[in-house]
Amino acid sequence: MTNLQWLIDAILAFNNFIIFYFVSLNSIYLMLFVLSMAAALRMARENFFSDSQQILESDLTLPISVIVAARNEELTIVETIRSLLRANYPEFEVIVVNDGSTDHTLDVLASTYGLRKVDRVAKRSLETRPVRSVYGSLSHPNLILVDKEPGGKPDALNAAINISRYPLICSIDADSIIEEDALLRVVTPFITHPEETVAAGGIVRIINGCRVEDGVVKSIALPGQGLPILQAVEYLRGFLAGRLGWNAIQSLLIISGAFGVYRKETVIRAGGYSGTTDSEDLELVVRMRRMLREEKKRFRMAFVPDPVCWTEVPTTFGDLARQRARWHRGLIQTLWSERTMLFNPRYGRVGLFVMPYFLLFEMIGPFIETLGYLAIVVSFILGSLDQEYLVLFLAVSVFYGVFLSAAAVLLEEVWFRRYPNWLDVAKLLVFSLAENLGYRQALSLFKIKAVWDLLMRHRTWGDMTRIRFLPASDSGKPSR
């Protein structure tokens, strides 16, 4: 055993590092959660979301172009467009870009809305693949369909920007439903800080299990499958205990591509959406931040936790693995392309703190966490596993995460209360435990595979198997 003493000493030293790493990571999570709590209290005290009518009538409420990139979305696209056309907003247009679908996406939209080819002049502010045709609707004058050669989601979004007419653009995923007042609420930062706000995002929640009728979520419920419920917990923690906290210190690094609003002029000056990464929403926000800091302009990017976008999440581990590998590849690609911002005081707290956090804890974290679990196994085999260390490791790596996940669920229930059924809230609390006992570790493996994909230069979008939204029925409780 003496010959293995060097290995035992090395593992013990690594174990001490692991404890320090997890304490640091979870302390940051805790800080963000405290900031989120304070922000939620402040919003509740100021009745932040009670002035929809005032926003609707305000002269500062800018017209908005809602853009949707669609490829093989025939199962969900009609309900998505119905929800957008029902939006309670003074002036807006909906631009759907069919990016070379091989299913019936184009035909379904054309037949549902009576679309016909029209002449519409597009300003080629951004380079895209050729547009085949543009369609309009007599019954819905504010609906435009662009049919173009396939070029990927960023290319499709850029094509929509070229043809858009209004100063704000709002990106929506083709498998998502927004609430009626969502646009009014998400543009609030553009009204309260009109000179500075360049981007704002709302919260994204899972639609699996909810019932939809004519583009409206009629009843809210969790699905029967465990995997989507785990993602529901993860989304609540990520948005309510993460982005709300980053927003409180004006350091938001990502606005979800599923529901984000941008000042079009700023997006065009930044070069539009880029196809060089696998996470176009993250890359655009970071690039915009770099550009505006270099121009020494005051700006704001905001997260508004109440305007809800309901989106479909993977129901199989295969789809989830492909999705999360793509997201992690996008993070690595963005950190590399914008590496000049890392540890650079020129870019403020984002350069000095936020970007390093994403590098050290989000990008490298899956490797360190996985190695920590392997070190536990090796220590046990070598007979050097200390019981007190094991308890401490589980406390900082698992139970701390359980606490934060459960706290995010309770934050949702106390301040936002989107789940009307107490049984669903209880399920979320139970799954906040399960999320940290297997699910999170699986995500780490998916992210490690993403690094391997990058090394092998494998870039696949990883299409998700689509399912139709559940139709509304008299059963179930109505949404609030």
Image (cartoon, rainbow, N blue to C red):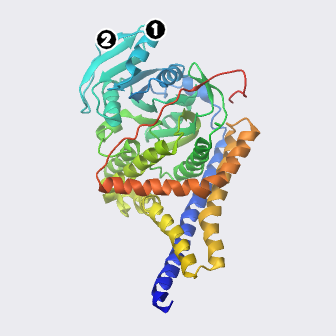
Q: Position of residue 264 (x, y in %)?
A: 36, 33
**Horizontal side of residue 403 vs 204, given as left or right:** right
Of residues 477 and 385, which is closer to you in this image?
385
Q: Residues within 10 Å of mark 2 (few under 14, many from 20)?
A: few
Which residue was labeled with disc 2? 118
Q: Is residue 431 above or below residue 384?
A: above
Of residues 49 and 172, which is closer to you in this image?
172
Q: Is residue 16 above or below residue 143?
A: below
- Examine the rendering and report whether any part of residue 321 can be seen: yes
Label 1, secondary structure: give it. Answer: loop
Which residue was labeled with disc 1? 139
Disc on the earlier residue, 2 or 1: 2
Could you say which disc has been placed on residue 302 in the image? none
Of residues 337 and 199, which is closer to you in this image?
337
Q: Residue at x 68, y 29 (%)?
A: 479
What is the count of numbered marks? 2
Q: Residue at x 61, y 57 (%)?
A: 437
Q: Position of residue 3 (x, y in %)?
A: 46, 90
- Examine the rendering and report whether any part of residue 298 can be seen: no
Type of the residue with mark 1: Ser
- Quadrant housing the C terminus: top right
Q: Is residue 463 above or below residue 434?
A: above
Of residues 315 and 391, which is closer to you in this image?
315
The image quadrant of residue 377 is bottom right
Alpha-carbon span between mark 2 and mark 1: 14 Å
Type of the residue with mark 2: Val
Label 2, secondary structure: give it. Answer: loop
**Horizontal side of residue 448 vs 383, given as left or right:** left
